[in-house]
């Protein structure tokens, strides 16, 4: 076949169109991952990790410190994390642990929707700043530096500078000024000071309790301290003070603290946390003795206790740690060190107080290892028995390692296992290999070689969690079964092996602001019941620790009362058809939205009565009735009904029947008639 110039132009246009659509799709995806509109500030975090949800999504994503912040974004901190939002206006918002806040910056000012936890405001505010709480309170902090904490339905407001206006859900207003605290609807003047511990201090302990030193000033006025796990100080524990101080045992958990004095005087409320942090876990060295052939070196890998952000690592050739060869505070969880000679070395891991908000009562981890020169080179070997598996987040953050033992420098190759293609090469030493941060999800193999030595270790990088909706299709229309007021909808989706729980969300609108129902399921299919006639929007979320981390596309489903009848049946009413020319009676009609099959019946008169000649079901909006021997020349009635059937073939609903009268002609030589029995309906 000859390829003409017009064909070439057409193909080029198609390729240009595909490229343009691909570019638009890329820009759309990039826009979704970068937020909407102009950035209004940045988000920073100090401990653990903070998460952010863009306004047009329901999925929570881990954010890197310093990433842009947009209006209508929501930011959430976990149990052992905190974050600071720095806005372009100069306003700073400090988020405590377990806090969820949504930012809405409009022309009228900034609105902070606080759904839990606590925030502190500071810095310039050249426009109105309002905090809305779950229990309906509106707190105007435009002219103040203030601390707002929520616990259940209770809200505590403390003002450090300026004034705050609090309006409850009934419309009652209360003004709180500097050195005043509003707790559980009661306002108190701050006459005392809790001098120790500092606000938001975390006490790390190995047990269920910690001994906490409290101090209040002035000593002569402070009589006791109050400890409570609620912001309204319900179920309070009171501890008497001696010379303004006390050191009671406090169980693990979050605590609100304040000093009390004579005549109802009080200090500002402070929040502390007792964390059962656990202990250090040593990963490397795996053995008490390490052989070397060239120069002695030691690599220490460990897991830190909960809430520990940095560790003081000490290495010495004596158990008293006098004149250590290494003594540094590190934020990472490993240390590589070249040592001056062979022998026994002692190491000690101690939580470091790198911030005033961490007070450790944990015992240090102490161990030792012997470094001895080997007669022969240590052969290369991987330490992992099973194939390691890493999350994509581990790889991207540079925290994915594969340990091996061996002497010298080795050449490495990373091979894509499905096709055997080498994707990266280089050299490695020191007994640990850090996976490149640019690896994507997939199955790989790490190969190490030096001379005749060769070893290989398979490993996997788990891709980001994904979930895809399989059924129903977008725009599906359902019709109520006959005699029923509600119907049901079956959903199925393709999940991920890393996901154990999914959440199905059905809403009134595409933005999912008016959610009708949320249901958590541990399967990949579900049937919604009780759907009434209206339009619904649905999506499925993949949950990780009850937090949405992936979502399907949004689909809409319409529920109608009745399946509409067919229209435009051909041959048309009273039309004469010569079926000898068409090899049968050709029928067609307009397809009905929501119908997945059609019932077709043909009637003719026999002995003066209208009887059913034939009945058939077809999936398409057409049918050829070729068995002409069942028909007589003359009038015939064609009846068509749209219907819905389920997966098992059961009829859910039928539309009202529509009939068309057709005059059948066999041309000059009609076929021999067939005796057609009456078909009972």
Image (spheres, rainbow, N blue to C red):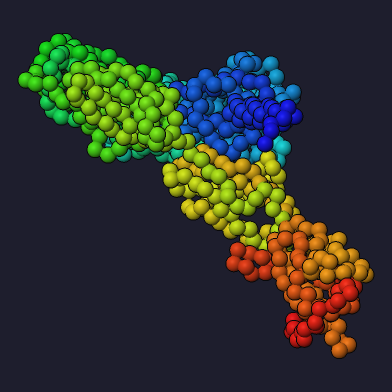
Left or right: where does residue 49 sit relative to residue 57? left
Residue at 63% in and 20% down? 39
Residue at 15% in and 21% down? 346
Count of marks overlaid on the render = 0
Residue at 24% in and 23% down? 449
Residue at 75% in and 74% down? 627
Q: Position of residue 641 (x, y in %)?
A: 78, 68
**Nearer-the-camera pick, 277 or 173:** 277
Q: Position of residue 540 (x, y in %)?
A: 57, 46
Does residue 217 appear anywhere in the picture? yes
Classify residue 450 by image quadrant.
top left
Classify residue 348 by image quadrant.
top left
**Nearer-the-camera pick, 270 or 302:** 302
Q: Position of residue 246 (x, y in %)?
A: 34, 29
Does residue 322 appear anywhere in the picture? no
**Nearer-the-camera pick, 125 or 412:** 412
Left or right: where does residue 623 sit relative to residue 220? right
What quarter of the picture does the C terminus occupy? bottom right
Left or right: where does residue 356 sit relative to residue 450? right
Q: Position of residue 130 (x, y in %)?
A: 66, 28
What quarter of the picture does the N terminus occupy? top right
Q: Image height check: is 542 above or below 412?
A: below
**Nearer-the-camera pick, 493 or 422:** 422
Q: Image height check: is 166 above or below 617?
A: above
Classify residue 167 by image quadrant.
top right
């Amino acid at each position: 076949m000859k390829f003409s110039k017009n064909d070439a132009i057409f193909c080029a246009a198609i390729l240009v169109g595909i490229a343009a659509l691909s570019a638009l799709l890329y820009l759309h995806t990039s826009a979704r991952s970068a937020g909407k509109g102009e950035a209004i500030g940045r988000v920073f975090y100090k401990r653990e990790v903070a998460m952010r949800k863009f306004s047009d999504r329901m999925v929570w994503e881990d954010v890197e410190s310093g990433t842009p912040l947009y209006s209508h974004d929501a930011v959430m901190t976990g149990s052992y994390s905190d974050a600071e939002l720095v806005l372009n206006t100069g306003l700073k918002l400090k988020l405590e642990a377990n806090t969820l806040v949504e930012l809405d910056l409009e022309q009228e000012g900034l609105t902070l929707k606080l759904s839990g936890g606590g925030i502190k405001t500071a810095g310039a505010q050249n426009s109105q700043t309002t905090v809305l709480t779950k229990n309906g309170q509106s707190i105007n902090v435009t002219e103040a530096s203030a601390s707002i904490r929520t616990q259940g339905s209770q809200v505590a407001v403390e003002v450090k500078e300026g004034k705050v206006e609090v309006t409850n859900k009934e419309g009652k207003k209360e003004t709180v000024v500097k050195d005043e605290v509003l707790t559980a609807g009661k306002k108190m003047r701050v006459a005392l000071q809790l001098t120790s511990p500092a606000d938001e201090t975390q006490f790390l302990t190995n047990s269920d309790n910690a001994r906490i030193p409290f101090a209040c000033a002035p000593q002569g006025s402070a009589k006791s301290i109050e400890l409570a796990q609620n912001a309204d100080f319900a179920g309070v524990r009171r501890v008497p003070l001696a010379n303004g101080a006390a050191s009671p045992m406090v169980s693990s958990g979050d605590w609100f603290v304040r000093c009390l004095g004579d005549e109802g005087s009080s200090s500002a409320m402070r929040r502390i946390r007792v964390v059962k942090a656990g202990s250090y876990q040593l990963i490397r060295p795996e053995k008490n003795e390490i052989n070397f052939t060239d120069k002695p070196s030691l690599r220490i890998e460990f897991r830190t206790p909960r809430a520990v952000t940095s560790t003081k690592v000490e290495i010495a050739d004596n158990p008293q740690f006098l004149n250590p060869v290494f003594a540094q505070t590190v934020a990472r969880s490993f240390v590589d060190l070249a040592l001056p000679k062979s022998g026994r070395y002692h190491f000690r891991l101690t939580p470091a107080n790198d911030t005033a908000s961490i007070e450790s009562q944990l015992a240090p981890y102490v161990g030792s290892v012997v470094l001895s020169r080997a007669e022969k080179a240590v052969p290369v070997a991987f330490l992992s028995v099973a194939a390691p598996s890493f999350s994509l987040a581990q790889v991207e953050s540079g925290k994915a390692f594969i340990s091996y033992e061996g002497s010298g420098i080795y050449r490495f190759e990373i091979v894509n296992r499905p096709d055997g293609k080498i994707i990266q090469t280089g050299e490695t030493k020191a007994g640990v290999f850090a996976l490149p941060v640019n690896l994507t999800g997939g199955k790989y193999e790490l190969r190490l070689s030096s001379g005749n030595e060769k070893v290989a270790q398979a490993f996997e990088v788990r891709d980001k969690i994904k979930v895809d909706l399989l059924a129903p299709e977008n725009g599906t229309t359902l019709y109520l079964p006959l005699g029923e007021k509600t119907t049901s909808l079956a959903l199925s989706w393709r999940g991920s092996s890393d996901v154990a729980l999914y959440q199905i969300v059905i809403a009134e609108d595409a933005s999912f602001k008016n959610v009708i129902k949320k249901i958590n399921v541990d399967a990949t299919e579900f049937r919604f019941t009780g759907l009434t006639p209206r339009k619904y929007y649905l999506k499925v979320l993949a949950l990780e620790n009850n937090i949405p981390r992936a979502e399907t596309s949004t689909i809409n489903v319409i529920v109608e009362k009745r399946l509409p009848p067919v229209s435009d049946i051909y041959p048309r009413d009273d039309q004469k058809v010569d079926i000898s020319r068409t090899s049968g009676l050709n029928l067609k009609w307009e397809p009905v939205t929501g119908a997945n099959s059609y019932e077709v019946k043909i009637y003719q008169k026999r002995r003066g009565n209208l009887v059913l000649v034939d009945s058939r079901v077809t999936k398409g909006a057409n049918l050829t009735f070729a068995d002409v021997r069942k028909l007589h020349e003359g009038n015939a009635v064609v009846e068509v009904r749209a219907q819905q059937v389920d997966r098992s073939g059961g009829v859910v609903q039928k539309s009202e029947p529509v009939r068309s009268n057709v005059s059948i002609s066999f041309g000059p030589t009609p076929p021999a008639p067939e005796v057609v029995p009456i078909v009972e309906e």
